Image (spheres, grey):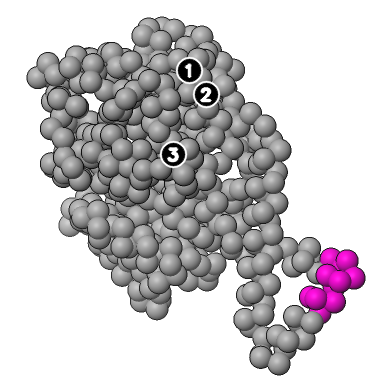
Amino acid sequence: MPAIAQSSGGNQLGTEVVFAKRGLGGSGDKKYRSNPAPYPHQRDAVNHFASPQFKSPCWLLFQMGSGKTLTALLCALELPALGSTSPTVCVVCDKSLVGQWAAAIRRLHCPAGFTFAVLSANAFEKRMKAGQIPRLARDTDLLIVDEAQSFRNLTARQKEMAGAVRSFRRVLLLSGTPIVNSAQDAVGFAFLTAGRADAPLRQASAGHVLCYDPRLCPGAAKLYPSVETEVHRVPMTWPQALKYAASRNNSTTMVLDGESWSVHRPINNRYSQALVSVLNMPFGDAETSPKMLALVANVAAGPLPAVVYSCRVERGVAPLVELLKKEGLRVGAIDGSVASAKERTAIVRAYNGGALDVLVLSPASARGTDLLGTASFHLLEPHNNLSEERQTLARAIRLRSHAGRVFSVVHVHHYVAHAPTAACPASDGAALEAGLREVFGEGCRYPARVIAPAVTALLAEQGGRTHDEQQVEDNMAKAREVDACMAEIATGAVRMPLTEASLEREAAREAKARAKADRKQRLGKQPAHGRAKTRAKSAASRNAGGPYLDSAT
């Protein structure tokens, strides 16, 4: 691969990794035997890639957590059968995922002679600006683009990069969410797929999209945990509501006892910058945050293990970690400060292995984290990016993420701040009066009984909904747009898997494993003399054709 210097092992060059795979030797299927066995939807995708029906570029439009990485690498292993004597595969991904792709390739067993290059999107762009793409495209047998929804806005830069991607002869585009926030994102999908930003989605996707959605496959749905969602509407305290209302607009006027008081704030203090912090932790102390206290109480009450997510670090992740530790919970966190892939992997392994009760995540960990056996997922605030919220939830709701577990339900909790509904308690009176002076100046002195109705009136004037509540409504509207676009794409897509029978067999094996785990757990809670009786009962039930195993499900 002349365009990228080769390495005999795994040469880490900042945002680039190159592997020359020596292979396992042998013949037939033996050389692939150590790779994970593909699921039906993965196997069908690989067969399609190797067939004359394959059209490039091709989207692997698999639901998040469905094994896109392994599927793409298994497709790469078909290159020798397609005539590539020394196959060269180039992966383009987000910088934060370079290490994970490198690790996946290290684990891959393949014939000798393969070369894999993993580039960050920025490294790919630098090669494009240096005029190296034509040579790279000529020397590459397969280009894999991870998180391909990043082309959705089709800016001038993205359009140039999309054109560079389309110049490769075989391209796999990986994404669980090609349409991210609204129908406007369809232009990027259409251009990357069909070369025309105005191409109808149904036409653009025809033959270019392999779609896997377990909601459309009853057999596949059984291999995922089910989800139960609850929205907690947490009332603000009155001092918090005052601070929120005063920060909501650039210029705020409040009427107190018939007298108007005004305050003007710099433009950068508007709600886009400040309001999430006010709703999360209004006074710099997590102990005074209603949402945080409600979240921590729910986590401590179980079920565990739990994942907690916040868009903020200083007023989200960091104080939540401290509050959860005070409850005696074993807590780990992954945010932007965890720069080392090794450290991040160690934290995930500790959570998956049962060494942590709670894992707290920030947007820095919304991709590439595979979590197992999560019982509850808590989101401190609604995300302003629908795709990021779905990506975050997909860390814990994955294919076989609950295999062998007694439970297979993830309880998802959303926390939404709203205006106070009860009268201002005496305990909040002094803080409310002090907050008024802080906002409007020392000359603004009124009792709490006057301030509270004025705050209510100001909130009503501002629409009656908090930023959290408005974001939930916006996300619901975005979800309807996104789902409509995805339905259009699905009409032209090739559905994976092609048959349900194999999925039903896999689901049956999963149910049997869960029954076994349930039985082991019950045996583990019994005294030693009770276990022998249970084993005897189980054997007698099986000999009589009884439903012992079924009753344990």
Let me know if residue 540 is in the magenta part: yes
**Residue 534 placement: quadrant:** bottom right
The residue type indicated by label 1 comes to Phe
The structure residue drawn at horizontal position 63% and vertical position 28%, both measured from the top left corner, is: 498
Q: Position of residue 389 (x, y in %)?
A: 42, 42
The structure residue drawn at horizontal position 28% and vertical position 13%, both measured from the top left corner, is: 167
Q: Let me know if residue 544 appears in the view.
A: yes
Magenta region, residue range? 537-547
Q: Let me know if residue 182 appears in the view.
A: no
Q: CA distance from mark 3 to mark 2?
A: 23 Å
The residue at which mark 1 appears reads as 54
Let me know if residue 14 is in the magenta part: no
Label 2 packing within 10 angstroms: few (<14), some (14-19), many (20+): some
Left or right: 404 as drawn, with respect to 208:
right
Q: Position of residue 505 (x, y in %)?
A: 69, 46
- Secondary structure beneath label 2: helix
The structure residue drawn at horizontal position 40% and vertical position 69%, both measured from the top left corner, is: 356
